[in-house]
Amino acid sequence: MDIQTALKRSNIFRGFSADDLALVLSLGQPLSFNPGDVILREGDVGSYLYVVLEGSVSIHTGDKCLARCRAYEAFGEMAAFGKRRRSATVRAVTDLELFLLDEAALARLLEGPGAVPFLMNVVQILCERLNAGNTWIACSLDEQRRDDGRCPH
């Protein structure tokens, strides 16, 4: 697998120049996991951002699966900015290849010409997740109202 090509296809590095991608590649490191391996745990303090190069992960809070990330998708960005506690546990679903950027790498990336595209991509990702969460909440409330007899649907 060509890591630079995978990063170029990722949602978090969309629009990056070849030079910006080369910088990203020099700052991070690839990691491999087996199905079932825990990548990060809910409640742990986080300072890493991950990009799925190959495979997929499931994202859980408690025993509830919130989402899956597949090839070219990023996760961990919420805790990576500001060393926040992880809001979920992430587990490998398949054989997994990740690309990790630690806090120092993210700080270096934010000092360069790729900072604005990177931050805009992070904002886009967070907006997509917020929209998905809002839809999920609305559907759950509709179901609850129907079950309670409070919704005419």
Image: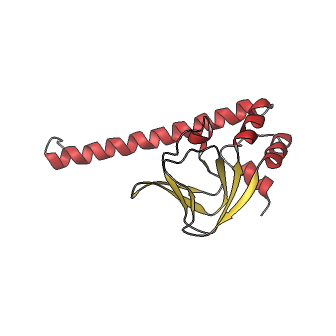
Q: Residue at x 70, y 45 (%)?
A: 102
Q: Residue at x 32, y 45 (%)?
A: 139
What colouring method underlies this structural image? secondary structure
| Rendered location of residue 111, percent (x, y) | 78, 30
At horizontal 40% and vertical 39% (from top left) the residue drawn is 134
Instruction: Decide: is 95 above or below 103.
Output: below
Horizontal side, residue 88 vs residue 115: left or right: left
Q: Is residue 122 above or below residue 44?
A: above
On-image quarter of the N terminus? bottom right
Residue 20: x percent and y percent? 82, 40
Q: Residue furthest left?
A: 149
Residue at the front extreme? 44
Q: Nearer the viewer, residue 116 or 47?
A: 47
Considering only vertical position in the picture, is 45 above or below 62? above
Kindly identify the residue that appears in the image at 42 percent across and 42 percent down.
Answer: 133
Return the x and y of residue 147 as percentages of the image width and height.
17, 50
Q: Quadrant of residue 57?
A: bottom right
On the question of residue 15 being in view, the answer is no
In this picture, residue 35 sits left or right of residue 104: left
Q: Quadrant of residue 34?
A: bottom right
Disc count in the image? 0
User: Whole-percent x and y of residue 142?
Assistant: 26, 44
Quadrant of the image for the C terminus? top left
